[in-house]
Amino acid sequence: MINPNAILEINSKNLIKNYETISKYSSKSLTGAVIKANAYGLGCIKIYNKLYKAGCRNFFLATLNEAIDIRKKYLSSNLYVLNGLENNKLSKFYDYNIIPILNSIEELELYLSSKYFDKNKKIGLQIDTGLNRLGIQIKELINKDLKNINLFILVSHFSSSEEISNIYNFLQNKKFKTVFNLFKSIKYISLSNSAGILNNKEFHYNLTRPGIFLYGGYQNKRLKKILKIKPVIKLKAKILQIKEIGANEYIGYNQTYKTKKTIKVAILGIGYGDGIFRILSNKGKVYFKKKSFRIIGRISMDSMTINITNCKHKICVGEYMEIINEDNDIEKIAKECGTISREILTSISRRVIRQYL
């Protein structure tokens, strides 16, 4: 068996615990799961299976291809495609028992004029309440006769749900409520993403759709205090080489790090080609036996250099150092990189081997 250079460990127990914690917090609503973008990089098929066993029956994906990949393996549950029809025929969805969430008047009219409307096939609608991304604007619906439409799901998306005191969240919710009575019936109403669940219980309705919270992100310390989200991943990389570098030598591309004395370094088999942000060059850190060590020099595509001069433990080629762990979680790294934890997760490339614990 080949020992991989980089491993993403996924703690299945903590994943399920997070799902259960969220479900308990929003106990008057069903709890769905957003598993788009390969379940935020953790592996869509595996994550679906684990969450389904935990009781989840509503799964949200971005694209039709993502949903078909799931449906080919699993026949149960509701699969929703958030991107709408994507210029595909309705038959492509219903052949696989997948629910499209329509995002425009044109898509809605296509459904209403089809045989699938007559057969009352499951359909969803997304309302643009102020994010101004995908979705139908409310003014486009006001003069439409929608009283014969049975919606399976009605959704919208917050712009700033992680900002608890932001009045814009309440304005979006107010707009959202104005369309409820336009339809004959609506089975599921869904507004709350991860942070929206904690923002206000008024936003829960009867179906929530957490994403990043499932995978160990908490977005900010204020939200972390409300809900105890457990870390789900650990990213670690193998030591490929250990060597001594003399004084006044340069490390890596473009001479960005110069040694002042003889140091001992470890070369790890992971780089920006695996999803490590290059901005962490000369400032990021990794861990070995609970102690942190600094990244020095520019991060390369397939490797990076760590200063292990002060390591008090015996350290050998073939052992692994941790880049993401409980001490250096995805939120801390995201802040250091000037981005969000969702980008950190989805940037971890496919050549990093996923292991499910």
Image: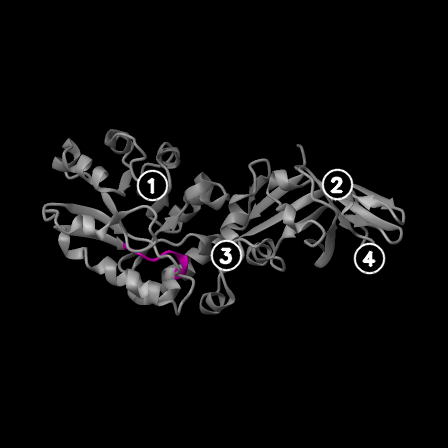
Q: Nearer the viewer, residue 188 or 82?
A: 82
- Which one is in front in this view, the residue at disc 2 or the one at disc 1? 2
Labelled disc at residue 323: none
Q: Is residue 115 magenta?
A: no
Q: Give the residue type at disc 4.
A: Asn
| SS at badge 3 | loop
Labelled disc at residue 217: 3
Q: Is residue 194 magenta?
A: yes
Residue 288 occupies quadrant? bottom right
Q: In the rendered image, which residue does mark 2 sit on?
A: 253
Mark sitting earlier along the chain (3/1)? 1
- Residue 45 visible? The answer is yes
- Which one is in front in this view, the residue at disc 1 or the one at disc 4? 1
| SS at badge 2 | helix
Mark sitting earlier along the chain (4/2)? 2
Q: Give the residue type at disc 2.
A: Tyr
